[in-house]
Image (cartoon, rainbow, N blue to C red):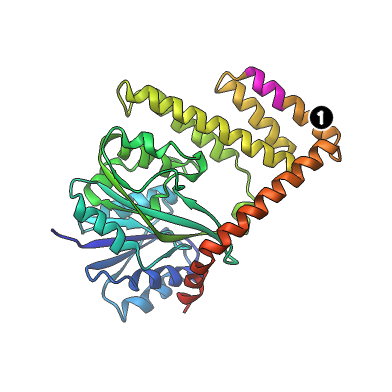
């Protein structure tokens, strides 16, 4: 079995982080490895960073785009340029953990018919604080066949979906199904993985194989484009484009429940943070997209009340309850995953 792999690293104007990502790949124990750095017309010191690696390690290759293709376009072009039977995608600010290729290739060896083999990805702040794991542990490790594998992926929490950069793909299938028309900002990774899981078998390993870096600037951004992207994926899923009955109806119902619950939980966070604008938008979406007029009106009226009475006893209780929940969750999570923060530092130089 040909086990050659390529790590695609799409990058744009992050030379200070790119070196860390490349080092984390070159530290993998797998011997049949290539690194393909896809520079999205950065016009800065990115080339210099990569050439330092090329001079000492022939496994590193560099591709400079003539113009900026967008994030999704750059990844799609990278899939086309891969020359190995397997590949993965590593954003320039993330870090591969040592188990990445050993774990995912083991899954491929055990199930050669699988088109992708995934592990769990740990979301971590720049300061080394673990936040969550994708996919969540409600999605059990194992071998999943199509089309029922898609039902397993959407059984857990909506925002804990499988991260596309925590996956080893069969290159030919990735080329065929990457949504080249997807606009930047849409959750094309969700659509991509759901499409694959609806049509092909896959493997999920239990190992944590990737660190996804959460930047403070990104955490502060509006989530509205993400809401709209989730809805677009839901519409495509509902249309029957990917699935036939009865699996389509079951997947639609599960996705509906996940979106409803996710929007409600995010609405609660907006209320606690005083983000009234997004709270109103979420209340409207529940009626416009899901026909939940009663629940929508309840949230709309609650938003009005809390906006007029930000210091009300109810809101203060809600703030304290969420704070206690976050603290308890954070302690458990920190105890289990803080050890991985060392890899951010280890691959800095």
* Main secondary-structure element of the magenta-colored stretch: helix
Check if residue 42 falls in the magenta segment. Answer: no
Check if residue 297 falls in the magenta segment. Answer: yes
Residue at 38% in and 45% down: 140
Residue 265: where, in percent of width, then height? 62, 37
Residue 126: where, in percent of width, then height? 58, 64
Q: Nearer the viewer, residue 333 or 109?
A: 333
Determine if residue 181 is in view. no
Q: Quadrant of residue 36?
A: bottom left
Residue 58: where, in percent of width, then height? 26, 75
Q: Nearer the viewer, residue 269 or 236?
A: 269
Disc 1 target residue: 305
Instruction: Classify mark 1: helix, strand or loop.
Output: helix
> Is 330 on the left or on the right of 270, as rendered?
left
Q: Residues within 10 Å of mark 1 (few under 14, many from 20)?
A: few
Residue 199: where, in percent of width, then height? 27, 35
Determine if residue 156 is in view. yes
Residue at 37% in and 52% down: 75
> Is 46 on the left or on the right of 146, as rendered?
right
Question: From this viewpoint, which residue is outermost toward the left?
Answer: 1
Looking at the image, residue 184 lies above or below residue 15 = above
Total number of numbered labels?
1
Q: Quadrant of the N terminus?
A: bottom left
Question: From this viewpoint, which residue is outermost toward the bottom?
Answer: 56
Residue at 81% in and 36% down: 314
Residue range corresponding to the magenta coloring: 293-299
Q: Quadrant of residue 153?
A: top left
């Amino acid at each position: 079995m040909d086990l050659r792999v390529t790590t695609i690293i799409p990058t744009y104007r992050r030379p200070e982080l790119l070196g860390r990502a490349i080092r984390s790949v070159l530290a993998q124990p797998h011997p049949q490895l290539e690194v393909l750095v896809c520079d999205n017309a950065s016009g800065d010191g990115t080339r210099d960073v990569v050439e330092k690696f090329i001079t000492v390690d022939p496994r590193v290759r560099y591709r400079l785009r003539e113009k900026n293709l967008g994030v999704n376009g750059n990844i799609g072009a990278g899939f086309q340029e891969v020359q190995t039977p397997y590949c993965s995608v590593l954003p320039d600010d993330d870090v591969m953990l040592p188990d990445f290729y050993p774990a995912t290739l083991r899954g491929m060896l055990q199930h050669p018919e699988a088109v992708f083999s995934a592990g769990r990805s740990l979301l971590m702040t720049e300061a080394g604080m673990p936040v969550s794991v994708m996919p969540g542990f409600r999605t059990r490790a194992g071998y999943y066949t199509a089309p029922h594998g898609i039902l397993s992926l959407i059984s857990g929490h909506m925002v804990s979906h499988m991260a596309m950069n925590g996956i080893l793909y069969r290159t030919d299938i990735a080329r065929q199904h990457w949504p080249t028309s997807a606009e930047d900002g849409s959750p094309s990774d969700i659509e991509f993985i759901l499409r694959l899981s609806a049509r092909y078998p896959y493997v999920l390993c239990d190992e944590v194989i990737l660190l996804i870096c959460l930047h403070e600037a990104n955490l502060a951004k509006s989530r509205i484009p993400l809401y709209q992207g989730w809805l677009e994926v839901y519409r495509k899923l509902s249309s029957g484009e990917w699935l036939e009955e009865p699996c389509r109806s079951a997947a639609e119902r599960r996705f509906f429940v996940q979106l409803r619950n996710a929007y409600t939980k995010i609405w609660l966070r907006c209320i606690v943070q005083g983000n009234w604008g997004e709270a109103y938008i979420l209340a409207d979406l529940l009626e416009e997209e899901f026909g939940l007029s009663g629940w929508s009106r309840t949230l709309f009226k609650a938003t009005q009340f809390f906006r007029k009475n930000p210091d009300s006893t109810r809101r203060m209780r809600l703030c304290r309850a969420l704070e206690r929940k976050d603290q308890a969750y954070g302690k458990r999570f920190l105890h289990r995953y803080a050890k991985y923060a060392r890899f951010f530092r280890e691959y800095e130089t």
